[in-house]
Amino acid sequence: MEIVLALAIGVLIASGVWLLFRPRTFQVVIGLSLISYGVNLFIFSVGGIRIGAPPVLDPAVGGAGAYTDPLPQALVLTAIVINFAMTALFLVVLLASRGLTGTDHVDGQEPEQ
């Protein structure tokens, strides 16, 4: 399970970095979103992978080691909301830049052919 999670994180981060180096602004926005998803999975994996463990206190389960750590879950939930707002802001800026410059390239210029 840990290998699959590590590969998923690596693929998301690598794809996001590759998209960051593309010349179009929409590809840059998608790259930032992929990196954010990869970081969210990384935060989950740092919290420990516990399958079938309750996330909240239950009197029937004994000991603190039997629970899932709720802090990474709260951090990832907050990061998802921030990522959604950041993506919406980037898309608005992308549309405004496209309207002002007439191109969607990162540097504002079409490549010479």
Image: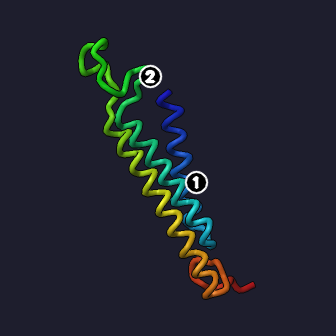
Rendered-image quadrant of the C terminus: bottom right
**Residue at figure coordinates x 53%, y 65% from the top left:** 88
Secondary structure of the residue carrying tag 1 is: helix
Which mark, residue 94?
Answer: none
**Residue at figure coordinates x 49%, y 47% from the top left:** 38
Residues marked 1 and 2 touching at CB (< 8 Å) = no
Identify the residue position indicated by label 2 in the image: 51
Seen as rendered, the residue at the extreme left is 63
Against 99, is 80 above or below? Answer: above
Snapshot quadrant of residue 108: bottom right
Against 27, is 9 above or below? Answer: above
Q: Position of residue 58 (x, y in %)?
A: 31, 19
Seen as rendered, the residue at the extreme right is 113
Q: How many marks?
A: 2
Identify the residue position indicated by label 1 in the image: 15
**Residue at figure coordinates x 67%, y 86% from the top left:** 102
Snapshot quadrant of residue 82: bottom left
The amino acid beneath tag 2 is Ile
Q: Is residue 91 left or right of residue 44?
A: right
- Cα–Cα span, label 1 and label 2: 28 Å
**Residue at figure coordinates x 44%, y 22% from the top left:** 51
Q: Position of residue 75 (x, y in %)?
A: 35, 45
Foreground residue, 54 or 24? 54
Foreground residue, 71 or 19? 71
Q: Position of residue 96 (x, y in %)?
A: 58, 80
Against 28, is 51 above or below? Answer: above
Q: Position of residue 49 (x, y in %)?
A: 41, 28
Q: Is residue 59 left or right of residue 76?
A: left
Foreground residue, 82 or 3? 82
* Mark closest to the chain's N terminus, 1 or 2: 1
